[in-house]
Image (cartoon, rainbow, N blue to C red):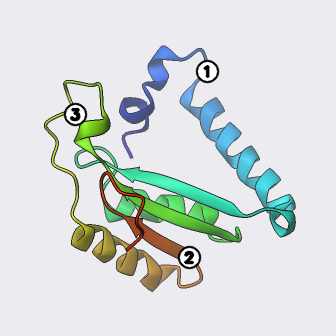
Amino acid sequence: MKFNEVTRSRTFFKSERDIMKGVRDSLVLLKKHEDRLEIVLQTLIVPGLIYKKSDLTKIAKMIKTLDARWELVAYDPQSTKSKRYSSVEPPTVKFLNNLREDILKEHATLRIEVKAAGQDQIF
C-alpha cells in the first residue's frame, strides 16, 4: 500500500511505524469491546492509491478477528478538493464486488459490503 502517499505521513510528526501502531492499538481496543459496539470500518477505494487486492488483503488480515462490517466505498471525484484526484474515475460497483469476492475467498468470515461513489446505498 502506498501508505505515505495516501496519508501524507511524511508531513506528520509521527512516523509510519507509530501511525500503524496506533491503528493496531485501536483494533485491539475495538476487539476488547466488540460485544458492546456495532463496528463499521470503511475503506475508500481510490484507483491508483488503494485499489489492489493485495492492499485490501493486508487490511483483511488486520481485521479478520473483529466482529465488524467492512465497507468498500468507491471514491467519488466530486467530493474532493484535490485537483490531483478530481479527474480520477471512480471504481465501478462491479470492480468493488470482484474485490469483495476475491477477499472473501481467503477470509470467508468477513462481512464486506460495497458502496458506490456518491451514494449511501449498499450493493
Residue 38 % position (x, y): 73, 64
Question: What's the residue at 62%, 63% (across, down)?
Answer: 63
Residue at image coords 24%, 69%: 95
Q: What separation in Å lies between label 3 and label 1 (alpha carbons)?
A: 25 Å
Q: Residue 105: x and y, percent?
A: 43, 85
Picture disc at residue 14: 1
Provide residue 111's location: percent of width, then percent of height.
56, 76
Q: The disc labelled 1 sits on which kind of residue?
A: Lys
How many other residues sit within 10 Å of disc 3, few (<14), some (14-19) or many (≥20)?
some
Q: Residue 22 placed where, x, y %?
A: 69, 38
Q: Which mark is residue 74?
A: none
Rendered residue at 68%/39% (across/down): 21
Q: Residue flagged by tag 2: what amino acid is it?
A: Arg
Circle 2: element type: strand
Task: From the viewer's perspective, tell me whether residue 115 is left or right of residue 91.
Answer: right
Q: Which mark is residue 111?
A: 2
Of residues 7 and 41, the one nearer the viewer is: 41
Compared to 19, does 109 lie above or below?
below
The residue identified by callout 3 is 85
Q: Quadrant of residue 117?
A: bottom left
Q: Secondary structure at mark 3?
A: loop
Question: Which picture quadrant has residue 68?
Answer: bottom right
Q: Is residue 32 left or right of residue 115?
A: right
Marks 2, 1: nearer the viewer: 2
First in sequence: mark 3 vs mark 2: 3
Give the Cα distance between marks 3 and 2. 29 Å
Residue type at numbered disc 3:
Tyr
Badge 1 crowding class, 10 Å Cα cut-off, few under 14, some 14 to 19, many 20 or more, is few
**Relative to 11, 41 lies left or right:** right
